[in-house]
Amino acid sequence: MSKLILVRHGQSIWNDKNLFTGWVDIPLSQKGIFEALNAGEKLSKFDIDIVYTSKLARAIETALIILSKIDTQKTPI
């Protein structure tokens, strides 16, 4: 059976300052990097076939950090 796993990007620098980010391309904060690493650890038990992300840096960075924790040899983004 197929499964859909949804993950929001880690905390951005502006999220930390309680500023609305919208489509402004703001990178992850240190906490956001830690959140992505933690998500990667939790998702490492799943066999992930493909990853989709928006074009925003914080989403791509989150996806790449997560993929660094799982077997990514066959996982296209």
Image: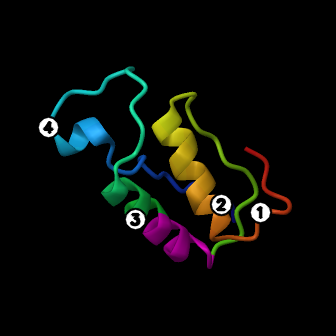
Tell me the quadrant of the picture where the C terminus can be found: top right
In percent of width and height, residue 6 lies at 49, 51
Where on the picture, by quarter, is residue 16? top left
CB within 8 Å, label 2 to label 1 = yes
Q: What are the residue bounds of the magenta stretch? A: 37-45
Residue 67 - label: 2
Residue 34 - label: 3
Closer to the camera in the image, 4 or 54: 54
Q: Amino acid at mark 1?
A: Thr
Q: Is residue 49 left or right of residue 38?
A: right
Question: Residue sitting at 51 percent across and 30 percent down?
Answer: 56
Q: Amino acid at mark 4?
A: Asn
Closer to the camera in the image, 75 or 47: 75
Please determine whether, in this image, residue 62 is positioned above or below residue 15.
below
The colouring scheme, among rainbow, by chain, secondary structure or one colour, is rainbow
Marks 1/4: CA distance? 33 Å
Q: Which residue is mark 1?
A: 72
**Of callouts 2 and 3, the N-terminal one:** 3
Please determine whether, in this image, residue 35 is positioned above or below residue 7.
below
In percent of width and height, residue 32 lies at 37, 54
Residue 18 - label: 4
- Count residues near mark 2 (Cα–Cα under 10 Å), then give few for <14, some for 14-19, many for 20+: many
Q: Magenta region, mostly helix, strand or loop? A: helix
Q: Amino acid at mark 2?
A: Leu
CB within 8 Å, label 1 to label 4 = no
- Count residues near mark 3 (Cα–Cα under 10 Å), then give few for <14, some for 14-19, many for 20+: some
Tell me the quadrant of the picture where the N terminus can be found: bottom right
Marks 1/3: CA distance? 19 Å
